[in-house]
Image (spheres, grey):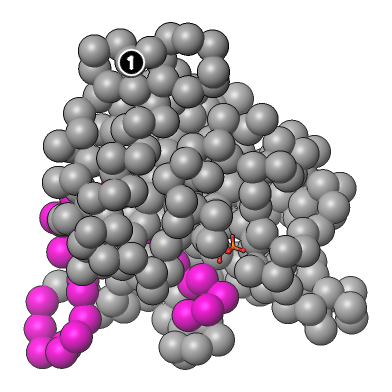
Amino acid sequence: MPMPLFIANWKMHGGADFCRRWAREWAREFGDDSGGNDDNDGKGGDNGDNAEVVVCPPAVYIGTLRAALSATGGAAKKVMLGAQDISKFDGEGAYTGEMSATMIADSGCAFVIIGHSERRRLSGDDDEVVAAKLRAAVAAGLRPVLCIGESEDERRQGKTAAVIHRQLAAAIGIDGIGGCGLVVAYEPVWAIGSGQTPDAAAIDEVQQIIRQRLINLPDVVNGGGFGGRIMVVYGGSVRADNVAGLVSGGGVDGVLVGGASLSAAGFAAITRMP
Ligand code: PGA
């Protein structure tokens, strides 16, 4: 079992001061290089060694958050950075307003969220665009976090598996996708920001479909370490009081957290999986 992966998606929230406050609060949660406190309050002294943590702020604040985290030293450095999106266009060019995968990697990001349902719904990211972004991410050495999931209607009509297969197809056939450390986030659209979640058995069913579909891609490592292993995480209304059940019962490798990640203390509590 790899270390669980916790991804924070701030969406269009925050600012420069917010980044600095978040980083300080995060550092307080996990102590610093000096060893922190090791009283038994579940805080400090726990350097978060048993989890991989990725934070995805709005792209304009990636540098600010990176600086704020490194200013705190110690455990805060363990946070990896991710972007919430990248351009579908390769290289450089006359693409006003776009940010390439290479630029995002250059800004210090290791991960990028691709195909979030809000982008699919509000910004026209269809499966073809998603495939182009995946290709760009892999070529730039970013680990894509591919978001997939059914809508409320699709769920009611029993189309969940079909939707999962269709959305996953965007990843199949992309050069290097099997060995790039792909993360697939199962995010039922109806669970995002709604306070509702599927039960663990339903998550388990979907994660099995995902792994089954991807396991035969070239370079996929079946089990074992991070490397080429494809990870499946769950997203949608994850909180500290439901995360443990969703992860262990759902058979997933971690979670993607929206609203609850805006508080560093709240997100820290999630990463401790009480
Ligand atoms: P939520 O969002 O945790 O606020 O439900 C999850 C997501 O959209 O990634």
Q: Quadrant of the N terminus?
A: top right
Q: Residues within 10 Å of mark 1 (few under 14, many from 20)?
A: some
Q: Extreme left residue here?
A: 93
Left of 227 or right of it: where is 220? right
Is residue 235 in view? yes
Taking the spot 77% from the left edge, 59% from the top edge, the residue there is 197
Q: Is residue 121 above or below residue 85?
A: below
Q: Residue at x 73, y 44 (%)?
A: 242
Name the residue nearer the viewer: 229 or 193: 193
Quarter that holds the C terminus: top right
Q: Quadrant of ligand 1?
A: bottom right
How many marks are shown on the rendered structure?
1
Q: At x 35% / y 40%, what residue is drawn?
A: 25
Q: Is residue 257 above or below residue 50?
A: below
- Looking at the image, residue 45 lies above or below residue 99: above
Residue 47 is left or right of residue 167, and the answer is left
Q: What is the three-letter code of the residue carrying label 1?
A: Gly
Magenta residues, start to end? 92-119
Q: Position of residue 160 (x, y in %)?
A: 79, 70
The residue carrying mark 1 is 36
Q: Identify the residue at image location x=26%, y=66%.
A: 15
Judging from the image, what secondary structure is the residue with disc 1 in? loop
The one of 122 and 114 positioned closer to us in this rendering: 122
Relative depth, front residue between 266 and 194: 266
**Closer to the camera in the image, 13 or 255:** 13
**Position of 104 compared to 267: left or right?**
left
Across and down, in percent, residue 165 comes to 69, 67
